[in-house]
Image: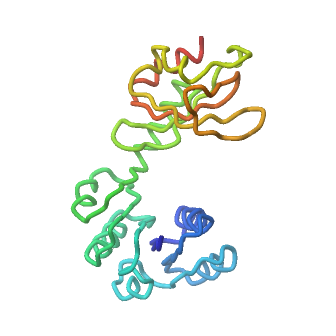
Amino acid sequence: MYVVIAGGGVGGAHVGQMLANRKDDVVIIEQDQARCEKLYAETGIITINGGATDILTLKEAGIERADVAIGTLYKDSDNLAFSLLAHSLGVPKIMAKMRHPDYAEAYRFAGVTTICNMIELFQNKIIMELENPNIQIISQLRGDTLLIMAKYPGNGPVDGISIVDLAQIHAFAHNCVFAGILNEKTGKIIMPRGHDLVFPDDKLFLVVNRQQIPGISHYLKA
């Protein structure tokens, strides 16, 4: 994929590095010259020194052939302007960081396909992990659908429990997808099938509805 990222701060730099490690073609637009030079020196990612809300800078970055545009700028107004320009230039997938929820409708109007609501994510993560310390939110996928990581109890069956059997337990029986198992002893992650086993202290990656989390948490504490 060809990806243009607006902003070379901590968020933009980390996303850029992650995508570059996947062998995607990445260009980062950053206004600070020193930061541009540092990014290129440390990561090898192509950086453009300029404003991500300037259409000439976007064209210099190759926005017209981008598969994805990602806005990681600090201000919502800047991310919104970047997104609108990217949409007008035909970028098929636009992702943006949103700080204030009042901008949500404007982002959708600007053609943003994925909105990352930073405040909501932060609040949900703090509250959820305080109430359910054995569950960690990895990502909010859409609406109330979450990707979570849950630690299977250390007092579970020594010989393990199969995904098929685990799925029969009420806490996991409805609207729950077993996306992965991180084996505590080997450190390896597998994409589980029904016969695969979960052992004590393994970590489960689950796609669930937010309302299911208390039930899952209660089971894991039992």
Total number of numbered labels? 0
Q: Residue furthest front?
A: 195
Q: Residue furthest top?
A: 222
Residue at image point 54% right, 62% down:
15
Q: Say which of 75 and 155 sits in front.
A: 155
Q: Say which of 69 and 117 sits in front.
A: 69
Residue 181's spot in the image, x, y percent? 62, 34
Residue 116's spot in the image, x, y percent? 40, 53
Quadrant location of the C terminus? top right
Tell me: residue 152, above or below residue 18. above
Residue 61's spot in the image, x, y percent? 45, 83
Q: In this image, 132 relative to 87: left or right?
A: right
Tell me: residue 82, above or below residue 159. below
Tell me the quarter of the picture where residue 160 sits: top right
Q: In this image, 31 relative to 53: left or right?
A: right
Q: Say which of 54 and 203 sits in front.
A: 203
Tell me: residue 195, above or below residue 70. above
Residue at image point 55% right, 67% down:
16
Q: In this figure, which colouring scheme has been used for the structure?
A: rainbow
Q: Say which of 48 and 142 sits in front.
A: 142
Residue at image point 68% right, 15% down:
156
Tell me the quarter of the picture where residue 145 sits: top left
Residue at image point 39% right, 61% down:
96
Residue 171's spot in the image, x, y percent? 47, 17
